[in-house]
Image (spheres, helix red, strand yellow):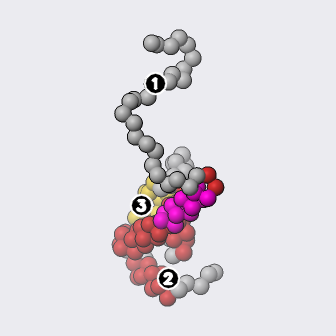
């Protein structure tokens, strides 16, 4: 088992204090990076995370004391998620600039609406 930092030990101790509280299920819908981060945090503190049959792959259920989830797990997840996405954005922008195109500007905005393109076979309407 991995050694926890002092902060990790405090959070684990807090979770142990709250184990007497009622366990509650929290259902979250996340993108793949958010899912990986939440699963890693949940596993770090021994919190159960799962999905029910036929639930979307983007859905996770966390079972833990409500106070722990609201006061500790979700704030920590939100903080780490912001850091993760800032890092991923910086990496993506750097890769795109170095490999594809160095111009970081947005697409130009034009006044005319595009012609509609029909992807269905058959006669076209004029």
The residue beneath circle 3 is: 26
Q: Quadrant of the C terminus?
A: top left
Chain-order first, disc 1 or disc 2 = 2
Asked whether the viewer can see residue 42, the reply is no
- For mark 2, give the secondary structure: helix
Residue identified by numbered label 2 = 8
Q: Which residue lies most toward the bottom here?
A: 6
Which badge, 3 or 2, comes first in the chain's sequence? 2
Magenta residues span 85-98
Kindly identify the residue that appears in the image at 51 percent across and 48 percent down. Answer: 55
Report if residue 49 lies within the magenta region.
no
Query: Which residue position holds label 1?
Result: 116
Q: Residues within 10 Å of mark 3 (few under 14, many from 20)?
A: some
Closest to the observer, 54 or 4:
4
Calculate the distance from the C-alpha at mark 1 to the C-alpha at mark 3. 43 Å
**Disc 3 secondary structure class:** strand
Crowding at mark 1 (Cα within 10 Å: few <14, some 14-19, many 20+): few
């Amino acid at each position: 088992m991995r050694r926890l930092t002092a902060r990790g030990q405090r959070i684990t101790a807090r979770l142990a204090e709250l184990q007497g509280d009622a366990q509650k299920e929290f259902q979250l819908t996340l993108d793949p990076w958010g899912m990986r981060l939440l699963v890693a945090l949940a596993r770090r503190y021994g919190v159960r995370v799962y999905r029910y049959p036929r639930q979307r792959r983007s859905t996770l259920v966390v079972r833990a004391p409500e106070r722990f989830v609201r006061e500790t797990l979700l704030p920590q997840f939100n903080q780490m998620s912001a850091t993760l996405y800032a890092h991923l954005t910086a990496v993506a922008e750097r890769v795109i600039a170095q490999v594809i195109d160095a111009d970081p500007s947005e697409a130009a905005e034009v006044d005319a609406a595009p012609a509609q393109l029909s992807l269905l076979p058959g006669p076209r309407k004029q």
